[in-house]
Image (cartoon, grey):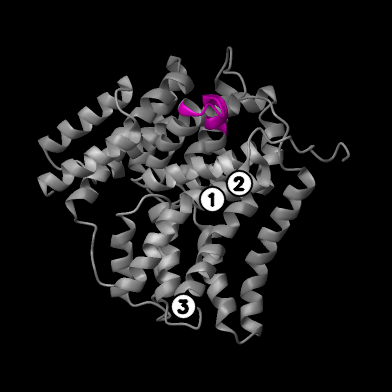
Amino acid sequence: MGSADVRSARPAGSAQEVFGASLRLGLTSFGGPIAHLGYFRREYVERRRWLDDATFADLVALCQLLPGPASTELGIAIGTRRAGVLGGMASWIGFTLPSALALVLFGFLTGSVDLSSSGWVHGLKLAAVAVVGQAVIAMARTLSPDWRRRLLSLLAAGVALAWTVPLAQVAIIAGGAVVGRFMLTGPMPPAGRSEPSPVSRRFGLACLLVFAGLLVGLPVLGSIVADTSVAFIDAFYRAGALVFGGGHVVLPLLHATVAVPGWVTDDQFLAGYGAAQAVPGPLFAFAGYLGAVSATAQTGVFGAALALGAIFLPSFLLVFGALPFWDALRAAAGFRRALAGTSAAVVGLLLAALYTPVATSAVAGPLDVVIVAAALGSLLTGRLPPIAIVVLCAVAGGLLGR
């Protein structure tokens, strides 16, 4: 492979190992995409030590800049670095499978039950507050160690709270890069572990071309071919390819995509959204429910699989396309300063998200504060593993009947 191609790194682990780790996260990562960053850091940086904080922050910044579900893309990127392309796929399967199966099963059983107000679901939200709080503290210590970067983190948090448009996160991260490149002086944090990219530049370029080709070609093909399957795939592919921030941001687009044409009723859509709040893993797995209950030829298990494949395909293409170039760029000194700025901005974004929507949607009274404080204290001291804290918070929420 020539110099134009980054040589593929020999995998440090196996796809089976990545699947086991990501399945653990898929079963326990409640609270949405921002909370997932805390769970991921706990599992991959602290527990398994597959990567260090600097590399983790670099990958977080990359996935925040890409459209699509950021936490899923982060998992794919970490799995790919650990075990190559197969590792990236195994990471997605493990992280997505539990929530996808639960939501598809819910679609088969009922489309009119609202679980979002259940007490144990409220307890899971409280656990997410603690997990995100622990992640903010740990990442701030590493990524905002001096007053300049702490100030940048606080500024990013303030802007994120005041400016809530969909592209705000991308703009804040870009602003952090500019500030870091031209205003952060002195020693910079070292780059993450220097490793050859597990994806070659040639393969990365091919993925980016396929991404763009499908984004342009599917609507054109749909206007030529009188087949609802093309429109079905295009609808979910665009939802995964054009939404920045992922998570709840995709809901308006999905609603316009499946409810307005009459594929899914409003009641079905809202019931499925309520159920999505009660399961761990990526909210984009909601697409599996929508595919399973859709009033099209693509329904049931086939519709669920088609919707899930279409909405997550852009994430694979973008991550595989970006990784080889990202690893090369982040080794440059000037780019490291820009990344130091983006890392501080990411801490600010996480801090803002800790307040809203994570805390504001979960903490409703003094007892909730006590539960969150106890869970956070347990995480910081390491007295209990995260999965035990999640279970205990769910039990506490159920007993309190919140």
* Vertical comparison of 118 with 44: above or below: below
Q: Which residue is mark 3?
A: 299
* Vertical comparison of 238 with 170: above or below: below
Secondary element at image label 3? loop
Q: Are marks 1 and 2 in contact (CB under 8 Å)?
A: yes
Secondary element at image label 2? helix
* Residue 55 relative to residue 287: left or right: right
Secondary element at image label 1? helix
How many residues crowd around disc 1 within 10 Å: few (fewer than 14), some, or many (20 or more)?
A: many
Circle on res. 64 = none
* Residue 99 relative to residue 369: left or right: right
Marks counted in the figure total 3
**In percent of the image, x 25 and y 30: which residue is there?**
375
The amino acid at mark 3 is Thr
* Residue 284 relative to residue 197: left or right: left
The amino acid at mark 1 is Trp
Q: Which residue is mark 1?
A: 92
- 301 drawn magenta: no
Rounded to the nearest whole Å, what is the CA distance between mark 1 and mark 2? 6 Å
- Image quarter of residue 353: top left
- Specify whether residue 181 is in view: no
Q: Earlier in the sequence, mark 3 or mark 1?
A: 1
The amino acid at mark 2 is Gly
* Quarter that holds the N terminus: top right
Q: Which residue is mark 2?
A: 88
- Image quarter of residue 178: top right
Q: Are marks 2 and 3 in contact (CB under 8 Å)?
A: no
Range shown magenta: 47-58
Rounded to the nearest whole Å, what is the CA distance between mark 2 and mark 3? 28 Å
